[in-house]
Image: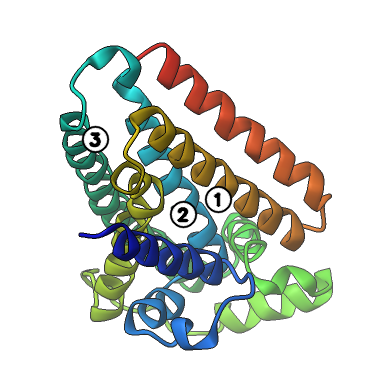
Amino acid sequence: MSTFIWLLILVIIIFLIIGLIQFRTPVRLMKSKTAKLILKNTTLGDRLCEIFYGVFMVSVMIGIINITASGYGLDIKYVLLILAFGVNITWGIIDGATSVYGSLVDKAEEDRLVNSLRREKQNPQYRDELKETLESTVVRKLSAEEQSKVIDMVQRGTPEDIKKYSASRDDLKSFFAIFLMDFICVFPVIIPLYVVDEIKSAVFWSHFIAVLLFIIIGMTWAKYLNKNILLAGAAFGILGMVTIAVTFYFGW
């Protein structure tokens, strides 16, 4: 493909990535099927984590082979492409599957706790465990008295039969959404290797884009956690640079 096409793909994907973590980006792009699938089936926290993982892993993969000492010339680009896609695709499958089945396990544990509470209504241990579970939901914003009323409402229900827990269609969509994010994150970091002819310059721009994405991710995390945006961006940028420097110069 021509340099223009590579650059166009790079710009579109970067806009998509920053749009997924709720930076300003063209509305039309965020209405695409890929963006809708990801936005509908993941939370902002999920997207920040997955994009961080994706960029981090492909950046490390580029540093795994010490390009300056390889002597392979352009061939190294194809080696890196295979490695980058191989690692991120594998991670996308693992992460997507563990996310889906981890959620199913959590759901099963919650159902078992509720059934235990309904069968042994006088057991204070189950009430305490349910209260701890509710702390990870919006119910934590209620007062202790209001939380107790919620637990009473749950307790009054009838125990349910234990069922088999299987991945639903929505779970499969979540899996594919996570997989897509890991897959997409390969492109911004790998494309400079095909746009810039001189290998050292290509790797520099690849690392520059990776660090820039780290900074954006750090600033977004800080924004939603009410922390210092500039400090978080700088910290994530430094983390990216240190990681890249270590993997690149030591040829891991």
Of residues 182 and 45, which is closer to you in this image? Answer: 182
**Number of marks:** 3
Q: Which residue does the image show at 25% across and 40% down from the upper left?
A: 87
Q: Is residue 170 left or right of residue 202?
A: left
Q: Quadrant of the N terminus?
A: bottom left
- Label 3 Cα crowd, 10 Å radius (few <14 / some 14-19 / many 20+): many
**Badges 2 and 1: C-beta atoms under 8 Å apart?**
yes
The quadrant where residue 60 appears = top left
Q: Could you tell which of marks 2 and 1 lies nearer the N-terminus?
A: 2
Where does residue 82 sit, x and y in percent of width and height?
A: 17, 40
Q: Quadrant of the C terminus?
A: top left
Q: Could you tell which of marks 3 and 1 lies nearer the N-terminus?
A: 3
Residue position marked by numbered label 2 in the rendering: 51
**Badges 3 and 2: C-beta atoms under 8 Å apart?**
no
- The secondary element bearing badge 1 is classed as helix
Of residues 148 and 62, which is closer to you in this image? Answer: 62
The label shown at residue 80 is 3
Where does residue 198 sit, x and y in percent of width and height?
A: 35, 33
The residues bearing labels 2 and 1 have C-alpha atoms spaced at a distance of: 9 Å
Can residue 151 be seen here? The reply is yes
Looking at the rendered image, the disc whose residue lies closer to the viewer, 3 or 2, is 3
Where does residue 6 sit, x and y in percent of width and height?
A: 32, 59
Q: Could you tell which of marks 3 and 2 lies nearer the N-terminus?
A: 2
Q: Which residue does the image show at 74% across and 54% down from the upper left?
A: 222
Type of amino acid under label 3: Leu
Can residue 104 be seen here? The reply is no
Residue position marked by numbered label 1 in the rendering: 213
Where does residue 236 sit, x and y in percent of width and height?
A: 64, 39
- The secondary element bearing badge 2 is classed as helix
